[in-house]
Image (cartoon, helix red, strand yellow):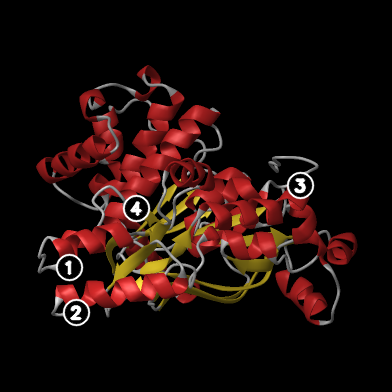
Amino acid sequence: MTEKIVVKNLYKVFGPKPDVAMQMLQAGHGKDEIFRQTGMVVGVKDANFHVAEGEIFVLMGLSGSGKSTLIRLLNRLVEPTHGQILVGGQDVAAMSSQALVALRRKDMAMVFQSFALLPHLSVLNNTAFGLEVAGFDRKTREKRAMEVLEQVGLGSFAHKRPAELSGGMQQRVGLARALAVDPTLMLMDEAFSALDPLKRTEMQELLLQLQSEHQRTIVFVSHDLDEAFRIGNRIAIMEGGRIVQIGTPDEILRDPSDEYVRAFFKGVDVKKYLVARDVAQSGGVPLVRPGPDGRDVCSRAIEQLRAAKQHFGFLVGDDGRLQGTVSLESMLEFLQTGGVNVGAALLSDVNPVPDSMPLRELIGLTVKSPAPMAVVDQSGLYLGAVTQTVLLKKLVEEEPQTELTTEVTHE
């Protein structure tokens, strides 16, 4: 997987003599001690991470943990004290001012919590502002601005002023303005935190929809667990300027690296964040391999299912992709009616579920389905099966972790 961002040994010290603070850090002095002795603040300490192309990478932490400073270091709104910031192979930390401006205009965009719209400009002109700065002619920038306003559902509001829009609509304009330059990298600092819960959820859904269409690289700062778990491919937990753990939401939730991370997630309802891929198990349902002779495939599959004392099986190709679900009855009927193509034995009313399906939705489907549920990824690769028994065992396993509280949000 190609890396869009690579950060190496990155530090930021706020104060008049950062070299002194850096020497103290190298000597083993802590952040609090440096502040007591010098008055200087260590905002980011020795950050090392990478972000893959097309990934949504979420920075989380309590207030003062350094997450907003870190995201601003990536485009040098905050100047680094030490370290490397490689974006598409270019070292942003060592870049000339001219090269940095060009990068910001053409390949990098930032969305702020405060919307930062220009009140005297229309929604259309606010959206096109970055293109105007980049030197595009009026016809080109207005055409592109209208395209992205349509994407975010604001095409009919193009000639309104920001003051005439709700907070959620204003944030959509901010997102549209960032999208207008068609960046490969988007930096979003608490972009939805000023919105009410309903509007925030709408914006998260919009972001995920746009991401599925364009696969941009996104670094997203958030203090909200629901938001981070909903949109993040991976999450970095920060504390005191340090990155203390990086992983998928499931990895961090199940294997916290230290007491800070453990306390950060204390009382979280694990079931709330489980999805189909967390529950799916391989080996429980027989896999049937297709072949040139559909009748021979079904005959062998019937023997296979009977030997395993199973009623259903999954037809999975040599490439690992699911082709469908079969049952003893469907295959016997296929043989009795003189079928030729094994596809005729597939159950038309049993469909696979995506690996990202939330547990609550999966429970409803599993309870109603007599057949096991096949779980597949975006490309159709078979990952495992969910049955009522598997689901019940999983819920029982998670119960001790959720008996005290059901939700936590860190401000």
Mark closer to the chain start, 4 or 3: 4
Residue 49, percent from left and from top: 56, 73
Kind of element beneath mark 4: helix
**Label 2: how many Cα within 10 Å (few below 14, some 14–19, many 20+):** some
Q: Which mark is residue 212?
A: none
> What separation in Å lies between label 2 and label 4 (alpha carbons)?
37 Å
Mark 1 and mark 2 in contact? Answer it, CB < 8 Å.
Answer: yes
The amino acid type found where label 3 is placed reads Gly
Residue depicted at x 24% and y 48%: 131
Mark closer to the chain start, 1 or 2: 2
**Label 4: how many Cα within 10 Å (few below 14, some 14–19, many 20+):** some
> What separation in Å lies between label 3 and label 1 (alpha carbons)?
49 Å
The residue tagged 4 is 211
Mark 3 and mark 2 in contact? Answer it, CB < 8 Å.
Answer: no
Comparing 204 with 12, the one in front is 204
The amino acid type found where label 2 is placed reads Gly
Q: Quadrant of residue 18?
A: bottom right
> What separation in Å lies between label 4 and label 3 (alpha carbons)?
31 Å
Comparing 98 with 290, the one in front is 290
Front of the two marks 1 and 4: 1
The amino acid type found where label 4 is placed reads Gln
Residue 60, percent from left and from top: 63, 54
The residue tagged 2 is 291
The residue tagged 1 is 342
In the rendered structure, the answer to whether residue 215 lies left or right of residue 294 reads right
Mark 2 and mark 4 in contact? Answer it, CB < 8 Å.
Answer: no
Residue 251, percent from left and from top: 62, 65
The residue tagged 3 is 267
Mark 4 and mark 3 in contact? Answer it, CB < 8 Å.
Answer: no
Residue depicted at x 17% and y 67%: 342
The amino acid type found where label 1 is placed reads Val
